[in-house]
C-alpha cells in the first residue's frame, strides 16, 4: 500500500514527526512541494533536525548546517539516518543523511550543547521597526501589487499556517526601487507543543519561507520565479536561545552578497518581538535562467 501523501500545510507537527524504522533511522511519508516541483527545503531542514534531536538527551540544538545534493522527489518517502560523531561533556555532534532510494538528497551536521547558566549577553536589535499588526498581510499586498498577485496569493494560500508581514514590500516587488535590506515578521498560525526541541525544528522549517530579493538585481520577485530557477545549495542555522516560541512574531532581517555565476550569500538575523536575537542563518543560493 502506498502510504505517501501530500501535506495540507495546516498542521506542522504532521510534517515534522517521523516514523521510527530502525536504530537511529526515521522515515517521512509526507511531502511539502516547492515551486520547482521538488520537496520544499524547509521540510528537509525541519525533519533532519527533528530526527537528530531524537538521539540527544537534555541538550538543545546550537547549529544545523545542511548541503542539498539533489532535488528530493515528492512522490517518494525520505529516510533520515543519524550518525553520532561526538558526545562530550558539553557538546554532542550528529551527522544526518537524507536518502531516497539509493541516492542522497541531503547531508547535514547538527550540534547540541549542555545549557549553561549566566548573564544574558545576547545581541539585541538597536532600532525601531513597524509592528507586525501595523503591516499588510500577503493577501492585502496582492491587491496593492497586482503584477505580483499570483506569486503573493500562492505564498498566502499554499502555506496557510504561516503569517508573513513584509516591512518594506517595494524592495521585493518594485524593480524601480533600489534594493536594500529585506525584513519581515513571521509566525506560525497554529498552537505548537513544547515537546523536546519542536520549536527549533519548526524554526528550521520556517527559515526557508521567504527569498531575499536582493539576490536578483533589477528583477522583481514575481519575475524572478517565472524566469529563473532558484536553488538553495547550502543552508546554515545557528540558535542563540533555548527559549523559542515560533507562534509569536519573529523578525527576520537579511541582506545578500552577490557573486559570480549566479551564486549569492543571503545572511539573516532573527529577533524576538523584544529585540532579542534568537537565531542567525546563511543561505548559499544559485539563481540561473530557466531553460525551455
Image (tube, rainbow, N blue to C red):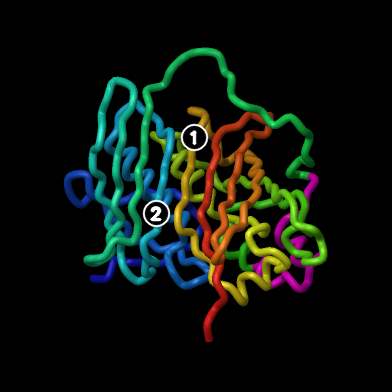
Label 1: which secondary element:
strand
Image position, residue 71 (x, y; %):
39, 67
**Earlier sequence position, callout 2 versus callout 1:** 2
Tell me where the magenta segment starts and ends, as one range.
134-153
Residue at 79% from the left image edge and 41% from the top image edge: 130
Q: Are marks 2 and 1 in contact (CB under 8 Å)?
A: no
Residue at 49% from the left image edge and 35% from the top image edge: 239
Q: Which residue is mark 2?
A: 67
Measured Cα–Cα span from mark 2 to mark 1: 18 Å
Residue at 23% from the left image edge and 38% from the top image edge: 84
* Dot label at residue 239: 1
Is 106 displayed left or right of 245 in the figure? left
Counting labels gives 2
Q: Nearer the viewer, residue 248 or 226?
A: 226
- Using a 10 Å C-alpha cutoff, classify the residue at mark 1 as few (fewer than 14 neighbours), some (14 to 19) or many (20 or more): many
The reply to whether residue 14 is visible in this rendering is no
Q: What is the magenta segment's predominant secondary structure? A: helix
- Using a 10 Å C-alpha cutoff, classify the residue at mark 2 as few (fewer than 14 neighbours), some (14 to 19) or many (20 or more): some
Amino acid at each position: 500500500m502506498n502510504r505517501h501523501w501530500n501535506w495540507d500545510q495546516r498542521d506542522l507537527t504532521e510534517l515534522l514527526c517521523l516514523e521510527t524504522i530502525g536504530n537511529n533511522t526515521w522515515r517521512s511519508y509526507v511531502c511539502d512541494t516547492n515551486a520547482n516541483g521538488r520537496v520544499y527545503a524547509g521540510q528537509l531542514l525541519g525533519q533532519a533536525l527533528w530526527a537528530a534531536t531524537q538521539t540527544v538527551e537534555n541538550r538543545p540544538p546550537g547549529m544545523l548546517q545542511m548541503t542539498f545534493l539533489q532535488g528530493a522527489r515528492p512522490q517518494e518517502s525520505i529516510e533520515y539516518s543519524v550518525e553520532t560523531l561526538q558526545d562530550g561533556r558539553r557538546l554532542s555532534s550528529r551527522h544526518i543523511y537524507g536518502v531516497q532510494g539509493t541516492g542522497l538528497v541531503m547531508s547535514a551536521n547538527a550540534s547540541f550543547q549542555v545549557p549553561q547558566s549566566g548573564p544574558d549577553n545576547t545581541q539585541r536589535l538597536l532600532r525601531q521597526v513597524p509592528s507586525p499588526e501595523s503591516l499588510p498581510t500577503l493577501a492585502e499586498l496582492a491587491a496593492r501589487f497586482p503584477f505580483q498577485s499570483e506569486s503573493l496569493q500562492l505564498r498566502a494560500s499554499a502555506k496557510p499556517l504561516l503569517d508573513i508581514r513584509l516591512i518594506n514590500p517595494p524592495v521585493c516587488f518594485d524593480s524601480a526601487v533600489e534594493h536594500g535590506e529585506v525584513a519581515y515578521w513571521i509566525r506560525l498560525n497554529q498552537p505548537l507543543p513544547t515537546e523536546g526541541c519542536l520549536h527549533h525544528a519548526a524554526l528550521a522549517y520556517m527559515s526557508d519561507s521567504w527569498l531575499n530579493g536582493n539576490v536578483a538585481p533589477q528583477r522583481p520577485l514575481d519575475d524572478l520565479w517565472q524566469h529563473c530557477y532558484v536553488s538553495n545549495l547550502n543552508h546554515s542555522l545557528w540558535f542563540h536561545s533555548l527559549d523559542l516560541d515560533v507562534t509569536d512574531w519573529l523578525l527576520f532581517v537579511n541582506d545578500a552578497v552577490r557573486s559570480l555565476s549566479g551564486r549569492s550569500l543571503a545572511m539573516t538575523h532573527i529577533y524576538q518581538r523584544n529585540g532579542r536575537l534568537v537565531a542567525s542563518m546563511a543561505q548559499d543560493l544559485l539563481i540561473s535562467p530557466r531553460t525551455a
